[in-house]
Image (cartoon, grey):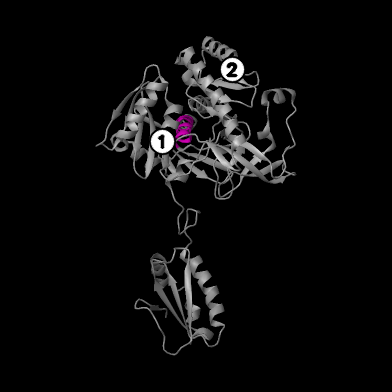
Amino acid sequence: MKSKILVDYQSYMCSVALLEDGVLREFYVEGQNMDRITGNIYKGKIVKVLPGLQSAFVDIGLKKNGFLAAEDMLEDRTALTRSGAVPTRLDVKEGDYVLVQAIKEATDTKGPRLSANLSIPGRYVVYMPTIDFVGVSNKITDESTRDKLFNILNKHRPDSHIGLIARTAAKDAKKSDIVEEIEYFANTYISLLDKFRSANGISQLSTDGNLVFRTVRDILNSTVDEIICSDTTVANRLNVYLRENLAQPVNVTLMEDVDVLKKFGVLSDVEKMLRHKVELKNGGSIVIDYTEALTVIDVNTAKFIGDTDHERTVYEINCEAAREIARQLRLRNIGGMIVIDFIDMQDPLHNEDVVNILTAETQKDRTRTRVLPMTELGLVQMTRKKTGSEIQSLLLTPCSHCRGTAHTQSPAFIARKIKAQLVDVFSDAFVTAAVVTVNPSVFESLAKGEWFKEFTVGKYAPKLVYLVSSPDVGHNSFKIGAQSSLILSLPDNAYLLT
């Protein structure tokens, strides 16, 4: 398998894409003015302790306070886990200063999630100065390689209480490179502690770097034979970074006058990736819905006909869907709890096959995932570790009309709300007319129908109702202006309902 990394650097946005055999597998984007904090380390101040939740709010100098839970204050996670003595008390008080790392971005409703267990990722190892654990990436499956790396880490960790994890790239690295990186991080941590002690109050002590170098560090592996970059300055900096960190640097190709995302089909793939519905090659489809608590994925037969064997047809759709779901989770960076509704199958072995395919495909993902067996209802529950923001939250903006529901209200319902407000307006005997301003698309529907017939006959007959079209009014909104004068002041496009 041959892979390429594309780096598209614009003045307003930076994107990094990973192509495996020409197929887009991972895509990351970051605005140049985006304040990403995951991975940053801070000297924070406890501003409020919540004893009932065994957690605290920590001021790290941002608009929203961070959230720190008791389980994220472990000093020796391995020993405590083995003994079953998981801490249930947060041993801090208001006014205390703590050394914390941001592990999850803030949302519209919540502040960033923080941890006192620092995790510093490098090219070959992850350095964890407060956790007693030595491990090797699950992506490295060769037992002899795992044993060799485990021995290197165990022998060269600076202290018996310091944790190290060998990353996937370590399998192709020289021992000296791994040891050198461990020593570098040991010195980095000492420097961090010095900064923490000398910092005058709340402050940021370190950052995880910008998108380009952070992502190249994480996704670069032995299958990558080329990095293609659209910016001269970034390409030069990448060359320096690769020379300093790799024994055999990967070739960096500069394509200044070419739209690299368009050339390799990434732009069209990303546009498809933002859609609610994903078409499968065999004619089936999957529909992805986001909620605050979880992501729900529904598998449909769509256009797939198959042969006369219904069970076989459904099985083939589910198998293809399992492969595409794993790809979409990775592409969209969907994290948290995920529930997949596969099409019902009668054969238990088919159910097992589909789950096995999903499990095998998610194992190609760098982000940790867990897939549970299929239930009797054809549902598969899985989790994927949240890392950064989901792509749809970065590239899509909320609809000003539907306000996040993905639907706009029907003309009948809008008319019903208008009528209710008109009754209140006309309860004032001095009001002679009402001017209702609506969105142009709503105006067409309301002007053609008999929505307001009761206001042209009976007790409201003397009252006048005018409709006005304005693009400044949202689809789900309207404005009503009451007039009491015999001489009305109306816009030129006012339409009298009769």
Residue 231 % position (x, y): 31, 35
Q: Earlier in the sequence, mark 2 or mark 1?
A: 2
Where is residue 214, by image quadrant? top left
Q: Is residue 458 left or right of residue 48?
A: left
Q: Is residue 188 magenta?
A: no
The span from disc 2 to disc 1 (Cα, nearest Å) is 48 Å
What secondary structure prevails in the magenta region? helix
- Amino acid beneath label 1: Leu
Instruction: Note whether 41 is above or below 223 in the view shown.
Output: below
Instruction: Note whether 492 is above or below 205 in the view shown.
Output: below
For label 1, the residue is 280
Q: Secondary structure at mark 1?
A: loop
Q: Is residue 326 magenta?
A: yes
Residue 342 visible from this viewpoint = no
Q: Secondary structure at mark 2?
A: loop
Q: Quadrant of the C terminus?
A: bottom left
Q: Are marks 2 and 1 in contact (CB under 8 Å)?
A: no
Count all numbered tags in the image, as a single digit: 2
Residue 241 % position (x, y): 39, 26
Q: Is residue 70 left or right of residue 268?
A: right
Residue 423 % position (x, y): 55, 78
Q: Is residue 258 left or right of residue 158?
A: left
In this view of the protein, which residue sits in the foreground, 302 or 53?
53
Where is residue 81, by image quadrant? top right
Residue 101 % position (x, y): 58, 36
Please report the bounds of the magenta region as a residue range.
315-331
Residue 157: which numbered mark, if any? 2
